[in-house]
Image: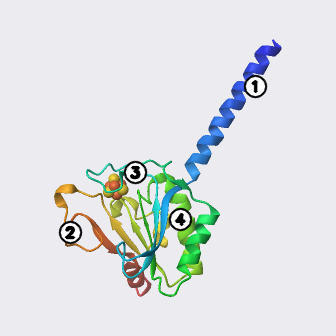
Amino acid sequence: MVELCMQIINFKNLKIEKVCNLKIQEVNMNYIRIDDFDMLNGEGIGVVLWVAGCNHNCEECHNPETWDQNAGQLFTDKSKQEIFQYLNKDYIHRITFTGGDPLFPNNRDTLTKLAKEIKEIFPDKKIWCYTGYLYEQVKDLPIMNYIDVLIDGPYVKKLRDVSLHWVGSSNQKVIKLYDQRSSEDHC
Ligand code: SF4
């Protein structure tokens, strides 16, 4: 009987441990790297945060190594401080979230908090965000209150167009949310 009880307790502990691990995986975000000087992924000179996790499976995606949400390393307070240190430079105009998909469900919570904090500390720096979702699918997410420019939609190989700025295929849109916000302010 004692042995049976011990087995039940061990089983319960195992379950609790599993649930805790799952919870940790749900709320934590991994990232691939941080670039401190970028001229390709948005207007002007910026910082780029390349996050892990994407479920759009675009054909001929340039970064398939970022699809796995466990790729790269855990985004920690130290990673955040590194970003703030880069953003503190006068010549840095923006930060761009890309990946992977910054709006992959696992990444939303961490990036919403990060975007909010960036706007509080660096109100003049723009936040750009790439996503494989359409604007209509994500427009009501809390993070949209802080994003200035959203580049939406999956990469579609047959619509590839290298003449376009900041997008890979012509279905993707560069949506200036700060224009929308300022016109709402004037209503
Ligand atoms: S959304 Fe971006 S990262 Fe994800 S599969 Fe498509 S091109 Fe690759």
Q: Is residue 110 above or below residue 69?
A: below
Residues 9 and 29: in front is 29
The mark that comes first in sequence, 4 or 1, is 1
- Are circles 3 and 1 on residues that touch, CB within 8 Å? no
Residues 142 and 42: in front is 42
Distance Cα–Cα, label 4 vs label 3: 23 Å
Residue beneath disc 2: 162
The mark that comes first in sequence, 4 or 3, is 3
Q: What residue type is labelled 2?
A: Val
In which quadrant will I find the C terminus? bottom left
* Labels in figure, total: 4
Residue beneath disc 3: 65
The mark that comes first in sequence, 2 or 1, is 1
Mark 3 crowdedness (10 Å alpha carbons): few <14, some 14-19, many ≥20: some
The mark that comes first in sequence, 4 or 2, is 4
Percent x, y for residue 170?
21, 66
Q: Residue at x 27, y 58 (%)?
A: 155
Distance Cα–Cα, label 3 vs label 1: 40 Å
The image's mark for residue 112 is 4
Percent x, y for residue 133?
35, 58
Q: In this view, does 78 lie above or below 165?
A: above
The image's mark for residue 9 is 1
Q: Which amino acid does label 4 sit on?
A: Thr
Percent x, y for residue 4?
76, 15
Percent x, y for residue 56?
34, 50
